[in-house]
Amino acid sequence: MQTLNEKSQHSLCYLKFLNLIEAIREIPTFPAMDPVEERLLNLLAATWHVGRRVSVLEAMGLSSEISATTAHRRLKTLRAKGMIALDADKSDTRIKYVVPTELANAYFATLGQALNKAQQLS
């Protein structure tokens, strides 16, 4: 069981992380994203992390909280913002896979650095 001091320490770390995230959102290098775009990008990142390829159709169904229509619209905006790209299947060009761009990889790396920094500051 955690002591009150340990809980406070974790809360402080999380609040510092949130503050760093807000600062990252202000960096002109990264495009502004609405909460649905961020959620979808995070879901995609978790899938990419385990080495799975994600088709556009699969990406549209990643979250029960986001309708397929909304997800498709946000995939288009994430693509326009340079955060994702589409890669055609080698054997069936009708199938497109959602892949991260260098900008998305830089964004995730920056978030990871923010998490590390928040932990060091606590």
Image (spheres, helix red, strand yellow):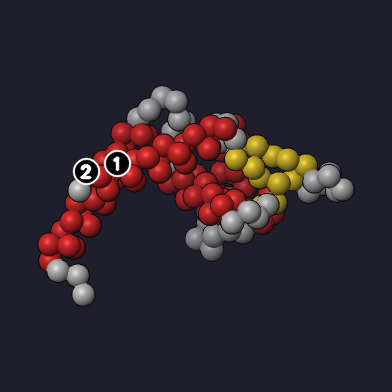
Q: Going by the image, does 4 lie left or right of 30?
A: left
Q: Is residue 81 above or below residue 119?
A: above
Q: Residue at the spot x=62%, y=47% of the render? A: 72
Of the pair 31 and 105, the residue shown nearer to us: 105
Q: x, y percentage for residue 107?
A: 46, 36
Q: Which mark is residue 121?
A: 2
Q: Amino acid at mark 2?
A: Leu
SS at mark 1?
helix
Q: Amino acid at mark 1?
A: Lys
Secondary structure under tag 2 reads: helix
- Marks 1/2: CA distance? 6 Å
Looking at the picture, tell me which residue is in the foreground, 7 or 85.
Answer: 7
Q: Are marks 1 and 2 in contact (CB under 8 Å)?
A: yes
| Residue 71 point in image, percent of width and height | 58, 50
Q: Residue furthest left?
A: 5
Q: Quadrant of residue 47?
A: bottom right
Structural crowding at the residue carrying mark 2, measured as other residues with C-alpha within 10 Å and reported as few (<14), some (14–19) or many (≥20): few
Q: Nearer the viewer, residue 22 or 35?
A: 22
- Residue in view at x 53 percent, y 37 percent: 104
Q: Is residue 45 left or right of residue 2?
A: right
Residue sitting at the far bottom: 1
The residue shown at (27%, 48%) is 119
